[in-house]
Amino acid sequence: MALKHRRRLPGALILLAALLSAAACSPTATTGTAVVAAEVTPASTPVRPPVISTGLPPTAPPPTAPAASATPAPTVAVSSPTPIPTATITPSPTPDRNILCSRRIPDNGLLNIVTLTYGLSRDYEPAGLVDLSGYLPGDVTLGYPTQLRRIVINPLVDMIAAMQAEGLKPMIISGYRSYSAQAIARQKWLEKEPERANILSAPPGFSEHQLGTVVDFGSPELPDIVGQEDIEFHTYFYKTSEGRWLLENAHKYGFTLSYPFEAFDITGFFYEPWHYRYVGVEMATLLHEKGISLTEYQLASEPPPCIPDPK
């Protein structure tokens, strides 16, 4: 009868009681749902404030920087810079002044001294020889196979053009002559005009023509002045229009008269008013202003270039 009067418990309460009873019997149990509800948020996690509705459209959050890519950046190989080589300027070789002049082979400078005492080896040939026919017309070169060093070409062409602009008609009789060519020329003059051979031609090895920087000029006026139709070289060249112009202006283009009239005792060569040597504008101007020859200047300022061969 007592069971009849027992009040039935709601199903939810019966379930709760069963859970509490099971939890009390287990030694490793937690506080269950009630404990979870009472859990405190760690201090390191910021607590969001409550959201208050303003009735305005939501504002987009500011853009955040993209997360760094997990792909590693490519490795750039950094090599040590290649050292730039230092330019080495090789000085011109000092001429050997302790050799016989017959063995002397000078460098390619413009101021190598050549006299009847200080000659050149038969093996010497200057570098950079070119044919004048490629730069000057036949009425200037007279069809001769004349060669000069390349460094002389432009100044010579400019000087010829300046002379022609003034109505002159310069001719080039000769330029570079090798040792053997000079020997042939010397022999020719000894046979043709033995009394004038020493005036007209130097012995082989003792001619500035072997340097490749010397020009012998001619003039169409010379035959009438001398009274000889086939004349090419004569001291009366100084009387021609071309001879006078060269004497006054050649230095402006780098040419100097090698054997002036008054320099015979110094140069050992007779007067050759047709014989001009290229030495550069600076040196040619200096010699012109001083009124001296290159040989005189060099003998006074430089040691002998070689040992004269015994006679």
Image (spheres, rainbow, N blue to C red):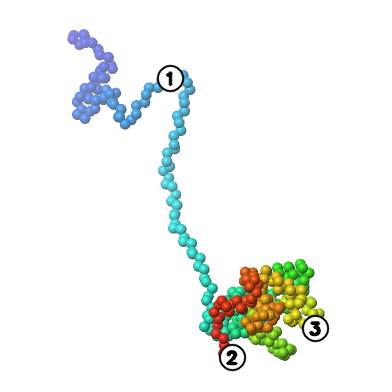
Question: Which residue, given by chain and number where applicable, does mark 1 sit on?
Answer: 53
Left or right: 90 with respect to 278? left
**For the residue marked with disc 1, what is the amino acid?**
Ser
Name the quadrant of the C terminus.
bottom right
Residue 178 appears at what percent x and percent y?
A: 65, 82
Left or right: 232 with respect to 73? right
Name the quadrant of the N terminus.
top left
Residue 198 appears at what percent x and percent y?
A: 68, 87
Q: Between disc 1 and disc 3, whose residue precedes?
A: 1
Question: Which residue, given by chain and number where applicable, does mark 3 sit on?
Answer: 228
Along the line of sight, the residue nearer the viewer: 308 or 178: 308
Along the line of sight, the residue nearer the viewer: 259 or 145: 259
**For the residue marked with disc 2, what is the amino acid?**
Lys
Secondary structure under badge 3? loop
Q: Is residue 213 visible?
A: no
Q: In the image, what residue occupies the spot 26% across and 17% down?
A: 13
**For the residue marked with disc 3, what is the amino acid?**
Gln
Residue 146 image-quadrant placement: bottom right
Along the line of sight, the residue nearer the viewer: 95 or 241: 241
Residue 70 appears at what percent x and percent y?
A: 41, 43
Question: Which residue, given by chain and number where applicable, does mark 2 sit on?
Answer: 311
Q: Residues within 10 Å of mark 2 (few under 14, many from 20)?
A: few
Question: What is the residue that sits farthest to the left in this orientation?
Answer: 2
Label 3 – label 2 distance at C-alpha: 37 Å
Secondary structure under badge 1? loop
User: Which numbered disc, 1 or 2, marks the residue closer to the eye?
Assistant: 2
